[in-house]
Image: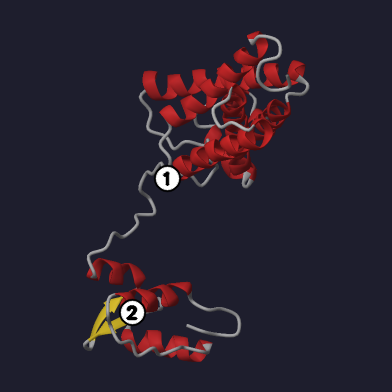
Amino acid sequence: MVTAEHTCPWGLKSLDLLRREGYEVEDHELTSRAEIDAFKAEHGVETTPQTFIDGKRIGGYDDLLAFFGKEVRDKDAKTYTRVAALFSMAALMALAASWAALGSLITVEAAEWFIAISMCLLALQKLKDVEGFATMFLNCDLLAQRWVRYSYIYPFAEALAGILMIAGALVWLSIPVALFIGVIGAGSVFKAVYIDKRELKCACVGGDSNVPLGFVSLTENLMMVGMAVWMLFKPVGVGLGH
């Protein structure tokens, strides 16, 4: 489907896949709503693109993937991909900052920046859809279940604590904020997952996440608690803000 308003990305993916598999493709572009509707009616299908090989209809892009024996992504499947990408990016950013500022990769600051940057990136995922995050958050957080507005405050508090920790500034504010939300969050996750044995989706990377609630969210909260405690008791002149 190629119209003035829209070019079908699944059509382009199907075309690319077929060519990579060694097929010669006769591409029939549907350029108007009338052509699209007529095609769907003729073949009794509800979506485009549709691939035909040797006169036999294979189907849409996912059907084509299955035809070639390739993995078809299950949109409802639980996955840690987004979390792995986020923490990997946070680690690389922390190492890059350490190298730029201190000329070394392995430093105390790199570890501190990793946690603080992770907090900021996790907060960003939540802030993309605060309403969706708040809805999922209410499933498990003990304080939010008693004071709903806390579910809307949480991502902003996490972002604030992370930014201040990166700067090493206003520690009198960042430490209690991180400690407060981290302790409540860790306790809530532990109760929901390990005591009540509930199977919930994790709100840690936003409201559209398929990450299972458990060690990822628990790790997020324990990282905040650990960072707050470290900043509270670390030796003078060591790490951020020295």
Question: Within the image, what quadrant is residue 196 found in?
Answer: top left
Residue 176 in the image: state x and y as whole percent: 69, 16
Residue 105 in the image: state x and y as whole percent: 56, 32
Question: Within the image, what quadrant is residue 199 found in?
Answer: top left
Secondary structure under badge 1?
A: helix
Colour mapping used in the image: secondary structure
Does residue 144 sit above or below 59 in this rendering?
A: above
Q: Rate crowding at label 1 as few (under 14), some (14 to 19) or many (20 or more) other CA atoms within 10 Å.
A: few
Residue 85 in the image: state x and y as whole percent: 48, 44
Q: What residue sits 56% from the left and 78% below the top?
A: 6
Does residue 42 sit above or below 46 in this rendering?
A: below
Secondary structure under badge 2?
A: helix
Residue 26 in the image: state x and y as whole percent: 35, 90
Does the residue at mark 2 contact the one at mark 1 (Cβ under 8 Å)? Answer: no
Q: CA distance from mark 2 to mark 1?
A: 28 Å
- The disc label shown at residue 81, or none: 1
Q: What residue sits 55% from the left and 42% below the top?
A: 206
Q: Nearer the viewer, residue 219 or 212?
A: 219
Q: What residue sits 24% from the left and 69% below the top?
A: 68
Instruction: Please name which of the two marks, 2 or 1, marks the residue nearer to the observer.
Output: 2
Query: Mark 2 sits on what residue?
Result: 19
The kind of residue on which mark 2 rests is: Arg
Q: Nearer the viewer, residue 205 or 136?
A: 205
Left or right: residue 239 versus residue 184 is right
Q: Is residue 134 visible?
A: no
Return the residue found at the far right.
170
The kind of residue on which mark 1 rests is: Thr
